[in-house]
Amino acid sequence: MNTHHTTGLTGPAPTVTVSVKPLVLSAPWRGADLHVRVTAPTTGTSLPVVLFAHGFGSDLDGYAPLVDHWASGGFVVVQATHLDSKRLDLPADDPRRPRIWRYRVQDMRRVLDELTTLVRSVPGLEGRVDHSHIVAAGHSFGGQTAGILVGLRVTDPQTGTAENLSDSRVMASIQLATAGRGGDELTPFAHANLPWLRGQDFSHITAPGLVVAGDKDDLPFSTRGPAWTADPYTLSRGDKSLLTVHGGEHFLGGISGYQAAETTDENPDRVALVQQTTLAYLRHVTGIDRTDWNNARTVLTGDHPLGHLESK
């Protein structure tokens, strides 16, 4: 039996949102057009932007519980469908597969390059967007994508080098249930199938960030257990916060979609915790309002049944 817990967190009154999809950007270098979805509030000005990267296999329709919440809280949320999406169904031997992590970063750059065009495609949105406040966010594989945009260095399995692929247009990141460092802590499965996890260096990340980790998120990629997903917090520099979701598995209670079949730990309270904490962080880091974030830090530092928030 699930006992219902209220989070005790605060947030803005939700506003009405509009969503437009698919907006299609040509992207010849990836061998398929880039399909994008934009979700935005119908009111408000100087709206900051969240660039969201989905987890492996998902698409621009995923993560509605987060996307809807952020948009109704005053953010323009932009999602792309990356090449690893089940919708594109790349064959196992597709030559793009080993570089799929890189294509994701290029997708995000393309979205940033075309942000004005994308905004113009949403009725009534033009002139209401703050292009100087952009946060990259992502879940699982998407967390790595968001991390790279703020300075995470990934050793390219094909070249053996770890380039700086960060983008100065991105001011902060939110990484949800994402990978830690590689090396000898990777399982043989991860080493063979996810070569872009072999060498991850978090030490160049100086932008502010929020990391969300489930303390029951035991992925088959690392021998270290759930603590592995806290690495983006413990190993990066800069102004960082870590939300540990108690009992949270990989989908943190069900953030990947309403009635998402892949959720193993379905729990509306957990989802509410992640929704409210991430929105409070977004409002704080983009300078809109710090009240909800300060409240979250107070409420979640003690013995809260749903989670724990720490900062460094």
Image: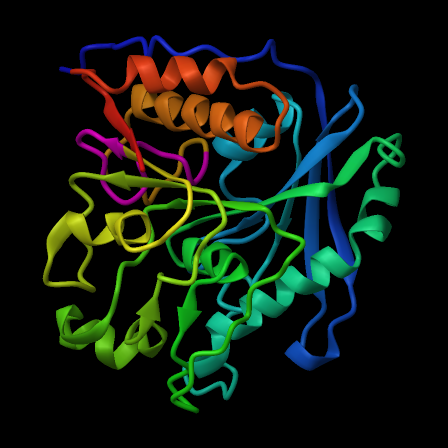
**Can the viewer see residue 91 in this picture?**
no
**In this view, 168 is above or below 64:** below
For residue 234, say whether it is visible: yes
- Indicate the quadrant containing the C terminus: top left, top right, bottom left or bottom right: top left
Is 226 inside the magenta-drawn segment? no
Residue 2 lies left or right of residue 149; in this view the side is left
Foreground: 250 or 154? 154
Q: Image quarter for residue 122?
A: top right
Residue 78 higher or lower than 106, as above or below: above
Viewer-proximal residue among 150 and 122: 150
Q: Residue at x 54, y 59 (%)?
A: 149
For residue 191, what is the image quadrant? bottom left
User: Which residue is depicted at the point 63% across and 28% down?
Assistant: 71
Q: Is residue 112 left or right of residue 293?
A: right
Colour mapping used in the image: rainbow
The percent coordinates of residue 9 (x first, y second) are: 39, 12
Quarter containing the N terminus: top left
Position of 18 compared to 252: left or right?
Answer: right
- What predominant SS class does the magenta segment belong to? loop
Rendering coords of residue 59 (x, y %)? 54, 53
Residue depicted at 48% across the width and 60% down the height: 145
Compared to 232, does 286 lie above or below? above
Residues in magenta? 244-257
* Residue 277 x/y as whole percent: 41, 25
Q: How many marks can you see?
A: 0
Q: Nearer the viewer, residue 261 or 12?
A: 12
Q: Quadrant of residue 259?
A: top left
Expressed as whole percent of the image width and height from the top left, the position of residue 190 reads 23, 72
Residue 245 in magenta stretch: yes
